[in-house]
Amino acid sequence: MAKKKRRFKGGEIPTASMADIAFLLLIFFLVTTTIDMDKGLGIVLPAEGEQVEVSSKNILNCLINSTGQVLLGKEPVKISDISQVVRKKLQDNDKLIISVKTHEKTKYKDYIAVIDQLKIANATRISIAETQL
Amino acid sequence: MKFERKTRLSSDIPTASMPDIIFMLLIFFMVTTVLREFSGLPVDLPKAMRIEKLKSKNHTSHIWVSKEGLVSIEDKLFNTEDIRHIMYERRAADPQLTVSLKADEQSRMKLISDIHNELRKADALALNYATLQATD
């Protein structure tokens, strides 16, 4: 039996489906990429040991107690009203520093709500005091 | 007078370079994809309205605080007193470091305040309270 000799025609990788394969990979990476940017309220902490004397009329104390009630200056305020009150006070005195003081057992949620309100009022000078019992 | 077109234009889009273009796109996405490195602790983030985006993921370090009072950095639990050492090293390696605090809305301010103090000791002063966007 004689073997038929095949002529070698030169090897070639089929490239017709290349685009499809690359597309599949592309879609895979598109789907698995999570573009979840971290979002949040930015704040800059004061440096360690940094103490600045501020005249008492430029300070607005904002106290939050453990049940989430807020005392702004001397009067109790609802959390949702803080931004309006603070905005008014900032118009009178643009050097106002808002000092946020919390109780040890204050919920973080209430604290964030207050900081958010201050941000809405465009208060840039926010100071965070240590917790108190 | 009638004009006759001299050149025949082929009407099909050239597809020979298509795989190259797609590969370029593919490589772009592969390079820019940052896989999520750490899973963190289960937290319910508080909601806020005036939120801002963090600038860069590469300059961000996360601290997770669960409602039970656990503190986790990169999937390891730490005591609050240890935060200063870790953050000091991070901060020394990357002066643009921003700390993202992912704390549960039910956690207490005592712990958050302790973390503030630790970060101040580590000189990592740029802080961001991770929050969700409030809907209203």
Image (cartoon, rainbow, N blue to C red):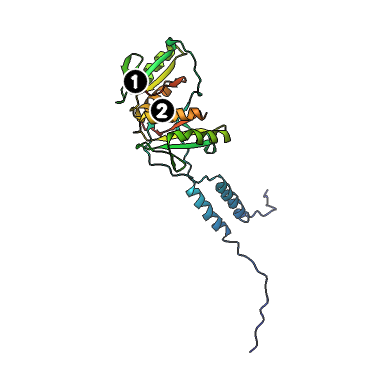
Quarter occupied by the C terminus of chain B: top left
Q: Secondary structure at mark 1?
A: helix
Q: Is residue A43 visible?
A: yes
Amino acid marked by disc 2: Ser
Residue at the (65%, 83%) spot, across then down? A4
Farthest residue toward the right? B6
Q: Is residue A122 visible?
A: no
Q: Please count the marks in the image.
A: 2
Residue at the (49%, 33%) spot, across then down? B84
Amino acid marked by disc 1: Asp
Could you tell me if the residues under marks 2 and 1 are in contact, i.e. CB atoms within 8 Å? no
User: What is the distance, in whole Å, between disc 2 and disc 1 at their CAs?
Assistant: 25 Å
Choose top left, top right, bottom left or bottom right for residue A84.
top left
**Front-most of B1 and B69?**
B69
**Front-most of B37 and A1?**
B37
Residue at the (35%, 33%) spot, across then down? B107
Farthest residue toward the left? A67
Q: Position of residue A41 (x, y in %)?
A: 44, 29
Q: Is residue B51 left or right of residue B17?
A: left
Choose top left, top right, bottom left or bottom right for residue B18.
bottom right
**Front-most of A16 and B33?**
B33
Disc ID at residue B113: 2
Q: Are marks 2 and 1 on the same chain?
A: no
Q: Chain of mark 1?
A: A
Judged by depth in the image, the label closer to the viewer, 2 or 1, is 2
Q: Position of residue A93 (x, y in %)?
A: 44, 11
Residue at the (31%, 17%) spot, across then down? A76
**Front-most of B77 and A126?**
B77
Q: Position of residue B80 (x, y in %)?
A: 43, 34
- Specify few, some or many for label 1: CA neighbours under 10 Å numbering under 14, 14-19, or 20 or more: few
The residue indicated by pointer 1 is A81
